[in-house]
Amino acid sequence: MTVSTDVCAPLAVLGHDVQVPLASGEKVTYAALDYAASAPALQRVWDDVAAYAPYYGSVHRGAGYLSQLSTDLFEQSRRTVADFLDLRDGDQVVFTRATTDSLNLLAGALPAGTRVFAFETEHHASLLPWRREGVTVQYLRAPRSHGEAVAALDEALAAAADGPKLFCVTGASNVTGELWPVAELTGVAHRRGARVVLDAAQLAPHHRVSVRELDVDWVAFSGHKLYAPFGAGVLAGRSDWLDAAQPYLAGGGASRTVAREADGSVAVEWHAGPARHEAGSPNVIGAYAIAAACRALTEAGFEALERREQQLVARLRDGLAAIPEVKVLSLFGEDAARVGVLSFVVRGWNSSHFSAALSAEYGIGVRDGLFCAHPLVRTLLGGEDAAPSECGAPEPSLPGERSLNAIRVSFGAGTPEEHVDRFLAAVRELVTDGAKWTYRNEGGRCVADTAAR
Ligand SMILES: Cc1ncc(COP(=O)(O)O)c(C=O)c1O
């Protein structure tokens, strides 16, 4: 494979030099390979937040200088996010806690009688918020190609009754890293009169997301996956359904006026726009940190970041392909385009045991389990519910040697090549020589038995 040599260096992140203890008592530099769960903070984000922190003040209506400065920065952060997402005129940015919060907000704003469509392969945050009174949810079976996904959506929408419809789709899978054909799916949805919300939790940290070009109606993402772990997230897009809905939270900030009526009741006039769904004191630092991350990623340039990430993806895939005991999980097949997220199983190993050994013996942080996408992972593993084997024990010999959970390795803009190489070397060694330590089950998790040290 030929790859351009015009590749940027990893972006500076916090924690790149943190030493962690191994089960043996030795210390090594941590290799953070769980970016898909939460990415480390970009140094730039940390520096920007630190520079602003002394000037932090209450936002909205505070009369003091720092309140006014903070209000300006909070509203400026909204504009930075709007630019980052290439929003259309009239779109709005609501600051939330994270993607889950954003999608629940939208779910609460659906007009009565809305039909929601989602593939069963979604993360639970995209799968579950729609299940509420007055909303019908239709789950579509796992497609095995982009074409199948587009055709399945078209068929489902064509058969749907009249009325408001919403299709929810993830941009990049948190399990396989595979990209979904968002623009094609949106084209079909719009032709059939449905709106689209894009779950960009895993896409936005890796790819430029243009709402205008993708033509989606809303997009949601989380700050902590975008190198800005300060507790904020975003829901951005069309205003009409959001402005027509009851506020997500009732309280100060969302209300324009509250007045006592002659009959003793209280009448409320709610704001329109983002404030309607941002009741309570907003997370100014969280919003500011997201804006700082948007600036830093834009300045680094997604083209260069993607080129570098694709080199790491190729290195990882080639390395894993050379280990016959490893099976990489994929919905759309070997050649599907993906971000730096990849799940796999190792023949004869309980995934929790394998991940615990990567941590305890090599200082490498990955994740194991079903990744809050149970239907997808079970589809990929080829099985239904069953209890995983005891930690430390080899997987029972199931038909086709199928595993019951998986291991996920994920990385991004701060990952040096050396982390991928270290990970591959560790996988090779564990597969060949086995774990050196003993492990036990503690509260359902596999941990190294350091008492045996
Ligand atoms: C694709 C996807 N959507 C939604 C979420 C939920 O994000 P959060 O936990 O930040 O709300 C995640 C988190 O892993 C995810 O990977």
Image: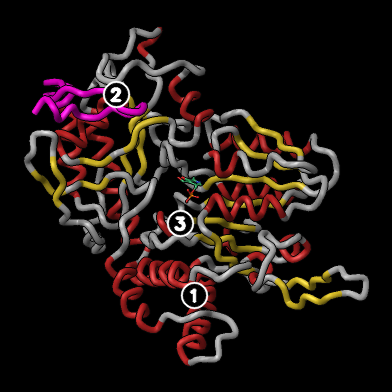
Please tell me whether mark 3 sits on a helix, a strand or a loop. loop
Specify the quadrant of the image occupied by residue 117: top right
The verdict on residue 436 being magenta is: yes
Residue 441 is marked as: 2
Is the Cβ of the residue at disc 2 closer than 8 Å to that at disc 1?
A: no
Q: How far apart are marks 2 and 1 (CA)?
A: 45 Å
Which residue position is annotated with label 1?
Answer: 77
Residue 393 is marked as: none
Q: Name the kind of residue labelled 2 in the image.
A: Asn
- Residue 147 percent coordinates (x, y): 58, 36
Image quadrant holding the N terminus, namely top left
Q: Distance between the residues labelled 1 and 3?
A: 17 Å
The verdict on residue 439 being magenta is: yes
Please tell me whether mark 1 sits on a helix, a strand or a loop. helix
Q: What range is drawn magenta here?
A: 429-453
Q: Is residue 165 left or right of residue 231?
A: right
Please tell me whether mark 2 sits on a helix, a strand or a loop. strand
Q: In this view, does 108 lie above or below 238?
A: above
Which residue position is annotated with label 3?
Answer: 204
* Colour scheme of the picture: secondary structure
